Amino acid sequence: MGESNRRGTTELRTTKAKRRSRLKWMIPLGVVLLAGLAVGVWYFGGLGTDKKEKAATEDHSKHDHGDSKKKDEVKKPEQPTIVKPYWRLTKSPPVTSEPVGLNFRFADHKTEEVITDYELYHEKKMHTIVVSKDLRDFFHYHPEMAADGMFNVNMDLKRATTYKIFVDARSKSQGWINEYAEVIVREPEVVAKHKDPKTAPPAPPLDPPNLVVNDKETMTVEGKKISLSATDLKVGKEANLTFTFKDAASGADVTDLQPYLGAVGHVILVSEDTSEYIHTHPIDDKQRGPKASFSAIFEKEGKYKLWGEFQHQGKRLVVPFVIDVKK
Ligand SMILES: [Cu+2]
């Protein structure tokens, strides 16, 4: 996205639901300075796309998928709650040579009271997905909450590029919380050359994802052959995504997939421009293979990269595919 260089020195940019006034979206300068103190660097909150709410809407409709009685909610998804986010990198600017911690928490938009009453959802209070904006890298973290409502994710981001962080949680009092932020990671040599914040290093160029649709292909992951049948890939329709698992050596059906975080699988979908984010769970939670079916509703046409996460014989399988959603 074009915003990356707008402020030149942006290390971490955050965005929120479009209902919010854009002007409110600067991270308070105090936070900024605090974060930058140790290493004398730059840290500004910025603005991104305003597609967030749409994406979050999709996301919410999907959270309930294990529960068939909630199916009609698909048409009328719960809106994400407007919260006040706080994001801080433990090291700024982040570099490819070292992991970087991200601290974040959310507060009530009006009272500014920090939210701590998260519900377990798929066995965790907080789901944090990190993807590189070219959609090559995918990470799924589950940070624990500290007593003050803060979460810390230690991210090992090894490429000089921009990463997008999606946060998924549900608070008892606030409802669904969906927020995101972007982090620019640079080569240490580039940062070293620009010690003075006034000559902040340029953001690395953003490589386009150049996604190649491959939903007719078969993946081999951890000794399993995995195929995807994706149907009704149309905006506004309930698409079906069914994975089929076979043992790569014998060709036999895999029928003993293990529940992973309370479901037979999880599928994360991100649109090519990373403006759309969908986290969906199985239609039937009893499935253990060879098939695992998911549904998703897309609000935007175009290519999406998806990552299916499963578990078999104690091993986590991450299965990436690219699909094309038509108008
Ligand atoms: Cu998760």
Image (tube, rainbow, N blue to C red):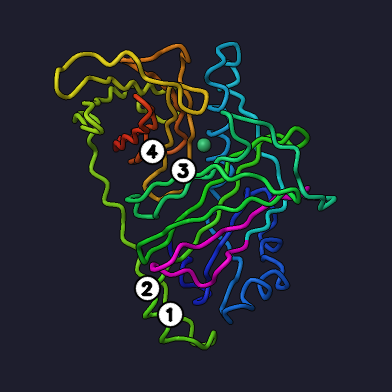
Residue underneath mark 2: 187
- Alpha-carbon span between mark 1 and mark 2: 7 Å
- The C terminus sits in image quarter: top left
Disc 1 is placed on an element classified as helix
Residue 168 image-quadrant placement: top right
Residue underneath mark 1: 191
Q: Amino acid under label 2?
A: Glu
Mark 1 and ligand 1: say if the CB distance to the nearest ligand atom is below 8 Å.
no
- Residue 137: % across, % down: 35, 50
The local crowd at label 3, few if under 14, some if 14 to 19, many if 20 or more residues have their Cα within 10 Å, is: some
Q: Are marks 1 and 2 in contact (CB under 8 Å)?
A: yes
Query: Is 303 or 223 nearer to us in this picture?
Result: 223
- Residue ID at (36%, 80%): 189
Q: Amino acid under label 1?
A: Val
Residue underneath mark 3: 140
Q: Is residue 318 above or below residue 71?
A: below
Q: Amino acid under label 3?
A: His
Residue located farthest toward the front when viewing the structure as drawn: 314
Residue underneath mark 4: 301
- Alpha-carbon span between mark 3 and mark 2: 23 Å
Which is nearer the N-term, disc 4 or disc 3?
3
- Residue 70: % across, % down: 60, 16
Residue range highlighted in magenta: 88-108
Mark 3 and ligand 1: say if the CB distance to the nearest ligand atom is below 8 Å.
yes
